[in-house]
Structure formats: structure tokens, C-alpha cells
Image (cartoon, helix red, strand yellow):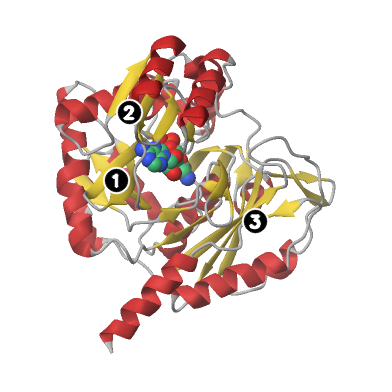
Amino acid sequence: MKVLVIGKGGREHALVWKLAQSPRVERVYCAPGNAGTAQDGVNVDIAAGDIERLVRFARREGIGLTVVGPEEPLALGIVDEFQRAGLRIFGPPRAAAELEASKVFAKELMRQADIPTAEFRVFDHPDPARKYIETREYPLVVKADGLASGKGAIVCSTREEALAAVDLIMVKEAFGAAGRRVVIEKRLEGEEVSIMALVAGRTLVPLPPTQDYKQALDGDRGPNTGGMGAYCPVPAVTPDLLRAIETTILIPTVHAMHNAKRPFKGVLYAGLMLTAQGPRVLEFNVRLGDPETQPVLMRLKTDLLDLLEAVVDDRLHEFPEDKLLWDERPAVCVVVASEGYPGTYHKGRTITGLDEVARVSDVKVFHAGTRRSDSKIVTDGGRVLGVTALGDNFALARARAYQAVHMLEFAGMYYRKDIAERAVRRSQEASASDM
Ligand code: AMP
Ligand code: GLY
């Protein structure tokens, strides 16, 4: 079968790499892809949002399955268009993608369905938003309603910061039309985890928990990014906690979407805060996370094509959670970014060391913002590479990932130095208390 992956980041490179390992896959295309997807598959020069051309390409090439990485084409209705053209595609239809495309929609759905999330209010004018902020005693988070590449949520410590956030989103329109409405919610304290689950009809199969590092700088400081690193699994999420998340959050959300006549299909991703009162939803995504997908797929042993087809064809019940095979070892992914990201940064910087790292076992460098320029591979985005490693324990996986990072170089390269530190500490504490 020929398969098409849509997108150009680390998540898409991981999908291309994993799908190419399936014995039933004849060729994996990636549109538009990056220098890494061109090594493990074949790039097609069509933008992820150009649905018409993507449909034409899939028809002409006889693509048996298309897999959508990013949220934008989902929100534009790519799944509906492919299905109309009689093409098989993995992802939710536009109506269900609203769960990610509108934070207002998601928060109201959660309120109606009694799904645990932070208290909130919605505003479509800056004045009432400011008045509301003046009356609040606790720290707040101000969020643009629409899509903003993970950067539209501003976590505020003071009233002044919250007022400035309203100004940035609603008056200066930093995120364009996405900021026409804002959600203002209570700031929650705790550890963050990402829970992704495959969903088809009434069947839901959770994937192992991951933890993402949203802030740009060590110690969770600096602005929010798309994600600076991730690891899988998460010691803090015990099997019991995962069951509780399934029954109080994931399943009620799938039911609520069904009742709202927006049946969900694809990957449901819940970004959660583990508070002292229990898990609370920070956001929903309607696709695989990036970089979370990189450590997850590094550990997956089951054929990914079989799994994705089971979702598309409504046969997911054939894959109960215990039938999925995972590498026992944890995986750690360190994102290597361009200095300046999530703000402005340079492109076109030559990357060295990739061939050397390719020879290291249990390490895979997934490309994100890269492209080929003559015989070189150069930077082409804010997040450049996702250096992903397996190890017998978290300390070893982490050490291996950073060893590989140290072999790579480009001008203005930067990365967080504390990815998975927490997991190392947790797992060491856990094994000490076992003794
Ligand atoms: P979102 O786009 O809603 O997931 O928000 C992006 C990031 O902002 C989250 O991953 C959290 O790190 C942070 N965040 C969002 N909402 C809250 C909240 N209510 N309390 C604390 N942090 C939050
Ligand atoms: N890493 C967060 C996301 O994919 O939205």
C-alpha cells in the first residue's frame, strides 16, 4: 500500500519512519515533509493546507491511507474532503476538530459534560475581560480561542500580566482572528501530562502517557512553545490513575462529542494538570502531539499501519490495550531548536553531525524544521530536530539522547538541558522504595 503523511515536523518524520517499517507499506509519501522525511520516505511538494491538490495527488497516486499530522488541515476539513473523494484518511472530521480549534467550544463541552477542568469565563470584548481580571484574587491564564501553534495560552502570575495578555491577544491581535474571543481561567498547579488515545466509534485505546516540556527555558521558565522535549512513559501516571483519566475524562469526552453530533475519530489528546484535587483538563488536541509522538513511536512494536487502519475502518476493538506491543524501555526526546524560537530566528544554518548520530544504536534523530540545500542539511524552522533515544532506564535513555545532541551542531542551536530529569528522579525514588 502507498501511504501519505501530511505535515512537516518531527511528528510527521516519526510517522513516516514507523509506517515505512510496515511490511504492507510499499511507499510513504510526505507532504510537504522535511529533509528527514525525504530520507525515510518520499517528499511531495504540496502544502499541508492545500487540500484540493492533496486530494488530486492521493487519487492520482492511488494512496491507500492518508495520515494527517497537524491541526490546521483538520480544522479546515481535510478529512471531510478526502472522504467525499472516496479516499481513506486518518483523523477527525472538521466538526470534531472543533474540540481543538476552539477553546471556547472545548470548555463549554467540558462544563456541560462535567469533565474536570479549570473554572473559566469567555469574553469577546477586552473591557469586560479587564473588569473580570480586576476582581480575581488568584493567578489566571488568558487563552486565545483559536489555533495559535501552542503559543496562544499566556500563564500569568500577576494582574498586570493578565491585563497585558488581554491587550496582546484582543487589541494587538498577536494571534489574528484566533484572539477574537478569549478564555480566562484559573491557573492550576501540578505536574502536566499528555494522554493520547486512539478513538473510533465507542472504542477508545489509550497510548502510554507522555510528558511534554512546553516552556522554552530550563526550569519551566520563558514563553510557551510547541514543545521542547518529551518522554514516555510517565512514572507519575500509575495504571490506576490512567484508568481514572479514562473514565472521568476521555470516555465522557467521546460521549459528549457523540451527543453533540460531532462523533470523534482519530487521536484524542488530553493535556492534563495533575492537581492535588485530581487530574484537570488544560486543553484537548485532536491529533498526535509533537514532540510526544516521537518517544511514543520509538517504543511502539505493533505495526502502525494495522493500528491506524483499524481506526479508519472502525475495527479498533480488534486492538484492546493489552494487544498493543511496546518496547519495555523508556524513551526520551530532546528538541533542538533555533535560538530565538518561539520568537524570530534565523534559517538556513548548516547542521553537522547527523551522519555520526545515525550510526548510534537506539537513537533516532527526527527532523522538524530542516531542508536539503545541495549536499547539506540546513535549518528551516524554530524546532529543528527531535533527538530521541531508548535506554534501559530513564537515566540511560536521557544520557543517550544528550550524548547524541552533543554530536550535533549548527549556529544558534539551543535546547533545554533538563528534559526527563523529573522522570529520572521519580523512577530512582520508586526503585529505592521498592528495596
Ligand atoms: P493550552 O494551549 O491550553 O494547552 O495551554 C498551553 C500551556 O499553558 C499548557 O500546556 C500549560 O503549561 C499552560 N496552561 C494552560 N492552562 C493552564 C492553567 N489553567 N493553569 C496552569 N497552566 C496552564
Ligand atoms: N506538544 C504539544 C502539542 O503537540 O500540542
Q: Tell me the SS state at disc 1.
A: strand
Q: Mark 2: which amino acid?
A: Leu
Viewer can see residue 409: yes
Q: Few, some or many C-alpha atoms within 10 Å of disc 1 (few <14, some 14-19, many ≥20)?
A: many
Residue name at image x 66 percent, y 41 percent = 341
Q: Nearer the viewer, residue 119 or 256?
A: 119
Marks 3 and 1: CB-CB under 8 Å? no
> Which callout, 3 or 2, points to the residue nearer the camera?
3
> For mark 1, what is the residue?
198
Please tell me whether mark 3 or mark 1 is closer to you in this view: 3
Locate residue 74, reporting x and y percent. Answer: 43, 27
The quadrant of the rendering that contains the N terminus is top left
Q: Which residue is mark 2?
A: 99
Query: Could you tell me which secondary element the residue under label 2 belongs to?
Result: helix
- Among all residues in the image, which is located at the extreme bottom? 435
Q: Horizontally, is 94 left or right of 51 in the view?
A: left
Look at the picture and state if 135 lies above or below 334.
above
Q: Which residue is mark 3?
A: 415
Q: Residues within 10 Å of mark 2 (few under 14, many from 20)?
A: many
Q: Which residue is nearer to you in this view: 220 or 157?
A: 157
Position in image of residue 142 (x %, y %): 43, 28
Q: Are marks 3 and 2 in contact (CB under 8 Å)?
A: no
Say whether residue 64 is visible. Answer: no
Q: Position of residue 296 (x, y in %)?
A: 42, 58
The local crowd at label 3, few if under 14, some if 14 to 19, many if 20 or more residues have their Cα within 10 Å, is many
